[in-house]
Image (spheres, helix red, strand yellow):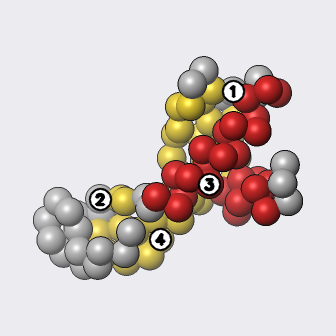
Amino acid sequence: MNYNRCFHCGNKLIPSTADMKISYEELVVEVQDAPCEKCSYCSRISFGDEVYGTVERFMETMKPKGISGTVMNYYENIAKGIEEGQ
């Protein structure tokens, strides 16, 4: 990501975190505190490909468990789970 400018208004993007709701096949998970870039002017949020990839890999591991409608913290549950091979 890190384009440094908002795709909507052209102003500066700053590192931040935000919540995101992801649907992956039949699973829906709300992810809290996912890293993103936020526009300093219009507050639009952009999540990078790395974040989406990490969440998708995590959702693939959750699919056999049938966990849906769950709220998970990006750093505590998702990125950590991928690092540990869960």
Q: Residue at x 76, y 39 (%)?
A: 61
Q: Is residue 32 above or below residue 69?
A: below
Q: CA distance from mark 3 to mark 2?
A: 21 Å
Camera-side mark, 3 or 1: 3
Camera-side mark, 4 or 1: 1
Q: CA distance from mark 3 to mark 1?
A: 17 Å
Q: Which residue is mark 1?
A: 68
Badge 2 amino acid? Arg
Q: Which residue is mark 4?
A: 16
Q: Which residue is mark 2?
A: 44
Question: Residue 85 appears in which quarter of the rendering?
Answer: bottom right
Camera-side mark, 4 or 3: 3
Question: Mark 4 and mark 2 in contact (Cβ < 8 Å)?
Answer: no
Earlier sequence position, callout 3 versus callout 1: 3
Question: Mark 2 and mark 3 in contact (Cβ < 8 Å)?
Answer: no
Note whether residue 7 is visible: yes
Disc 3, SS:
helix
Question: Does 62 sit left or right of 85 as displayed?
Answer: left
Badge 4 amino acid? Ser
